Image (cartoon, rainbow, N blue to C red):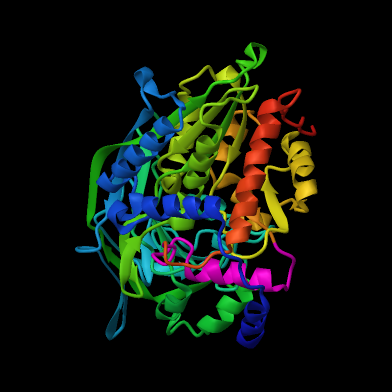
């Protein structure tokens, strides 16, 4: 899409209406949760603890009941963090007669974790897509440089890593696919941190995992006789790629730190009114955490996380306020999970350690990163084919004139990137939603512009514009869907998988 066409589509988008009273209150809650004083609500941070206290107070005022540990409102996760410290970490390409430094978190990043070496100094080989056939024995004792294609039919990130490890590489550098338009790579990285739950074994990468900005690929390939732009274009178009040795050496000095921490889920119950359905709990959820402080973008280093996901914690609070203790037939558990941005930690922890009988978890409706930027005419439903929730969703959406569609961009892997995934993995019907759009429309242009400029950036803050009517329409849809599931004649069921 050309810039001129993009601007034309955005300018053609309809103007937004003024918010009604309910939407004003929703945005006030969103603003409070993502205010600078919350410091981005990073997992385990004082700002996140303040957000937990605020959410708990709002649920208590809405006459919900505590459903956490030991009769309280929270469930505490015990966690461990590994971090690559920018101060003290130095990465460079050393070529005959010159050294080219790579700026950490801007040109290159590194996945934090246990077992990383303090230094790396090795020759490099470009291995194309890094399939086993492409690598062969060429990378033994070297750094494997791989093109990070995310399209079907080519090696995935785990497959690339496994192939490089099996071929004897000492590290892998994955080059961004700049042609992946559905979710373009964003730089800088906020930080290089890995947080894991301590009730599971710590993940240990066989070899260090680096990610390279495509704009910095020329520094690695210079002198090889190959043109960086041509390789990037061919890779982005899934064309065959040649493997070849690179003339420089990859050098790194890695400064690491680690610590233990804790962070809380908030769990609150709206009891049901039908004793016969007391063991069929509907979980409605969103996540409380954001990115906290990280690398600055446009001079701002505070990642407020207004739409991702303070706004939809606010939607849960709005529903609780509207009910004021008046239950549906089934109990509804309001779950605000921590650590979503660090790997769905809170949702997965709750499913492993539920504070209610696990067999009683009947369904999950999760809210994460919804962006009311244009009129709500279409919703992408995640997990659409996996349970009978799709039938209920369509029935609720139809009178509201909202079209329901499956994920049109499955290569992004969104069905595994929000907290509902933990429920699906446990065989519990679950879903989440994305504001949908028709291809090549103003809505698509607005959506992609937001992803490119605000997603996981400091610019996702309370000052950004939104479509008030779209926000109100979605919040009404969510309330109606919760009622339909919680009051329905039968609970949702998982769809049997084909053999």
Residue 403 position within the rendered picture, expressed as x and y whole percent measured from the top left: 77, 53
Residue 217 position within the rendered picture, expressed as x and y whole percent measured from the top left: 45, 76
Q: Quadrant of the N terminus?
A: bottom right
Q: Quadrant of the C terminus?
A: top right
Q: Is residue 202 visible?
A: no
Position of 166 with respect to 44 (left or right) is: right
Position of 460 with respect to 263 (left or right) is: right
- The residue depicted at 74 percent of the width and 69 percent of the height is 439
Range of magenta residues: 437-461
Question: What residue occupies the far front of the structure in this picture?
Answer: 21
Q: Is residue 238 above or below residue 247?
A: above
Q: Is residue 99 magenta?
A: no
From the viewer's side, name the closer residue of 298 and 224: 298
Residue 308 position within the rendered picture, expressed as x and y whole percent measured from the top left: 48, 54
Question: What residue occupies the far top of the structure in this picture?
Answer: 276
- The residue depicted at 73 percent of the width and 59 percent of the height is 377
Residue 232 position within the rendered picture, expressed as x and y whole percent measured from the top left: 56, 76
Q: In the figure, residue 249 lies in which quadrant?
A: bottom left
Q: Is residue 291 visible?
A: yes
Position of 423 with respect to 170 (left or right) is: right
Q: Is residue 459 magenta?
A: yes
Q: Is residue 7 above or below residue 64?
A: below
From the viewer's side, name the closer residue of 4 and 215: 4
Q: In the figure, residue 102 lies in which quadrant?
A: bottom left
Q: Is residue 207 above or below residue 245?
A: above
Count of numbered circles in the view: 0
From the viewer's side, name the closer residue of 498 and 269: 269
Position of 321 with respect to 48 (left or right) is: right
From the viewer's side, name the closer residue of 233 and 393: 393
């Amino acid at each position: 899409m050309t810039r001129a066409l993009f601007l034309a589509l955005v300018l053609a988008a309809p103007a937004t209406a003024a918010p009604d009273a309910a939407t004003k209150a929703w945005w006030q809650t969103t603003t409070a949760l993502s205010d600078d004083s919350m410091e981005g609500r990073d997992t385990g941070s004082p700002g996140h603890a303040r957000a937990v206290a605020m959410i708990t107070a709002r649920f208590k005022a809405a006459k919900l009941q505590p459903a956490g540990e030991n009769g309280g409102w929270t469930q505490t996760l015990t966690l461990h963090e590994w971090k690559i410290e920018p101060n003290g970490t130095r990465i460079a390409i050393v070529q005959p007669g010159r050294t080219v430094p790579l700026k950490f978190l801007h040109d290159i990043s590194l996945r934090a974790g246990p077992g990383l070496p303090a230094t790396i100094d090795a020759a490099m080989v470009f291995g194309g897509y890094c399939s086993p056939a492409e690598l062969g024995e060429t990378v033994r004792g070297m750094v494997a440089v791989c093109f990070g294609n995310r399209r079907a039919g080519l090696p995935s990130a785990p497959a690339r890593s496994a192939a490089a490890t099996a071929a004897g590489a000492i590290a892998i550098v994955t080059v961004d696919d700049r042609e992946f338009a559905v979710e373009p790579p964003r730089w800088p990285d906020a930080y290089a941190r890995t947080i894991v739950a301590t009730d599971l074994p710590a993940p240990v990468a066989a070899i260090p995992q680096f990610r390279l900005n495509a704009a910095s690929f020329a520094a690695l390939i210079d002198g090889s006789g190959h043109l960086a732009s041509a390789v990037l274009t061919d890779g982005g178009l899934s064309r065959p790629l040649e493997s070849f040795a690179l003339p420089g050496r990859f050098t790194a000095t890695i400064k690491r730190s680690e610590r233990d921490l804790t962070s809380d889920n908030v769990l609150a119950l709206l009891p049901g009114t039908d004793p016969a359905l007391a063991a069929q709990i509907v979980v409605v959820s969103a996540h409380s955490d954001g990115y906290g402080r990280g690398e600055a973008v446009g001079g701002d280093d505070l990642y407020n996380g207004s739409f991702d996901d303070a706004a939809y914690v606010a939607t849960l609070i709005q529903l609780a306020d509207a009910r004021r203790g008046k239950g549906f037939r089934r109990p509804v558990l309001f779950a605000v999970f921590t650590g979503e941005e660090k790997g769905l930690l809170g949702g997965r922890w709750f499913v492993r350690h539920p504070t209610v009988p696990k067999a009683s978890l009947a369904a999950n409706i999760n809210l994460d990163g919804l962006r009311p930027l244009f009129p709500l005419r279409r919703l992408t439903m995640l997990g659409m084919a996996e349970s009978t929730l799709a039938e209920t969703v369509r029935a609720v959406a139809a009178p509201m004139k909202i079209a329901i569609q499956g994920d049109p961009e499955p290569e992004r892997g969104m069905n595994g990137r929000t907290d509902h995934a933990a429920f699906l993995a446990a065989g519990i019907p679950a879903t989440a939603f994305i504001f949908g759009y028709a291809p090549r429309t103003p809505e698509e242009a607005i959506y992609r512009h937001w992803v490119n400029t605000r997603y996981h950036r400091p610019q996702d803050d309370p000052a950004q514009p939104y479509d008030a009517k779209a926000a109100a329409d979605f919040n009404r849809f969510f309330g109606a869907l919760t009622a339909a599931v919680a009051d329905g004649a039968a609970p949702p069921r998982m769809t049997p998988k084909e053999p």
